[in-house]
Amino acid sequence: MEKRQLRFWEIWNMSFGFMGIQFGWALQMANMSSIYEFLGAKPDEIPMLWLAAPLTGLIVQPIIGYMSDRTWHPTFGRRRPYFFIGAVLSSIALVMMPNCSELWMAAGLLWILDSSINISMEPFRAFVADKLPENQRTFGFSMQSLFIGLGSVVASALPWIFTNWIGVHDADDHTGIPTNVKWSFYIGAAAFFLFVLYTILTTKEYPPSEDNAKAAEHKRGFAAGVSEIVHAITHMPVKMKQLALVQFLTWPGLFLMWFYYSPAVGADIFGGIAAENADPALRALYKEGNELAGLTYSVQNLATFLFALALPVLAGRIGKKFTHQLCLSIGGFALIMLQFIHGAEQAHYLFVVMACVGIAWASILSMPYSMLSDCLPADKIGVYMGIFNFFIVLPEIIAALSFGWVMEHVLDQNRMLAISIGGCLLLAAGLVTMRVKE
């Protein structure tokens, strides 16, 4: 079916819900490691506690992709029912997360939160390929990056805003999790649901073609789903395999940053301690460093928001893979530079570092998917997008299972050195990008 060119505001509406999804991801990225440390976790235990994210993505995304490829309702469409279910479940989990009183509760709830976010997120990737003609897909994925950046700017800064603008102070409770973090998660829950609901109510979907509808009707059930997912894995397009290697190197670099950046700012740059029985002055320093780290995440995502506007133009001039290689290199060098920031008096340099990471993040969220969507069969976009997620979550699983040992026995619990290793992985991913055939 020939797809019409969509107007700017139509693409805006279909991408707006991703801003809500990013509230969930950004609050998790900026605060979960600190929540774990507030509840008593040690640095070498952090990677294993993050294992929920990759495992849920590995399981949930291909299944949701397969199911959404075969879903159709005249009123609710194909992808939008999954947007709604994921938004409801994610919002509930976001409200519950900062009220955990034990480490095991926070780790378990992260599994629920990540599963719920994935239910909404995976169909959003396929949504772009469903609705846009090929020449508009780079712009469509860049619009998603724009909303991801905008949502993350606000979500990451919320704890700092509650303390410094609104004057929220910690109340005595049994969790040890700061009050400003709790209110940030509550706001994130409301934003997640309302923004996704906006996209659901303002966007229509194309019905499946007659041939695709008949094929889907003959391929229902668990066995058919497993068979199709296995077939898709074993028959991936060559370009998808090349992009898979890029993803396999990119995402562990990001995960190492998410694992350790906020605690590293609080402990290694500000010199604080997270433990509840620590000296109150040292605990206050750790909290101050964490709030600043959240604010620098906002600068990172502001850079993502602004640079997403330039990505389609840059990709049109020098090509998608050259654009992606350049952005990954900028982000990789920036993470390595964190090693040279010492003391709270130099903390302002963190804003420069994270702005550079934001440039890489804008490209990571759009360029691989734009390059991938050009080579996928139209009736299997959902399942292939879910499989593509394997090459995000598999390296994270490896990192989660192994990096705790590396932290304890090789890096001597050095969070900053772990982040520098992440920067080196981004540089390697940039070099591998040059092998992708356009």
Image (cartoon, rainbow, N blue to C red):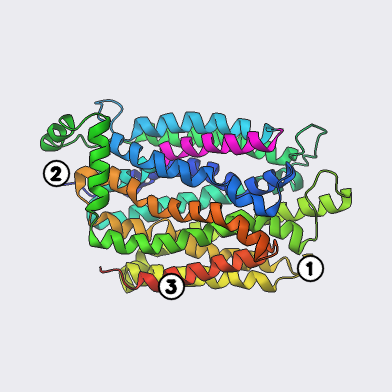
Residue denoted by label 2: 1
> The C terminus appears in which quarter of the rendering?
bottom left
Residue denoted by label 1: 345
Tell me whether circle 1 and circle 2 mark residues in contact (CB < 8 Å).
Answer: no
Residue 301 image point, x, y percent = 54, 56
Under mark 3, the amino acid is: Leu
Toward the viewer: 157 or 410? 410
Residue 414 picture quarter: bottom right
Q: Main secondary structure of the magenta part?
A: helix
> The N terminus appears in which quarter of the rendering?
top left
Sequence-earlier tag: 1 or 2: 2
Q: Nearer the viewer, mark 2 or mark 3?
A: 3
Residue 227 image point, x, y percent = 23, 39
Under mark 2, the amino acid is: Met
Callout 3: few (<14), some (14-19), or many (20+) C-alpha neighbours within 10 Å? some
Callout 1: few (<14), some (14-19), or many (20+) C-alpha neighbours within 10 Å? few
Horizontal side of residue 256 vs 201, given as left or right:
right
Give the magenta-colored segment's residue range.
Answer: 101-121
Toward the viewer: 37 or 360? 37
Residue denoted by label 3: 326
Residue 166 image point, x, y percent = 74, 41
Residue 114 image point, x, y percent = 50, 39
Mark number displayed over residue 357: none
Residue visible at 54% across and 41% down in the picture: 24
Q: Is residue 131 visible?
A: no
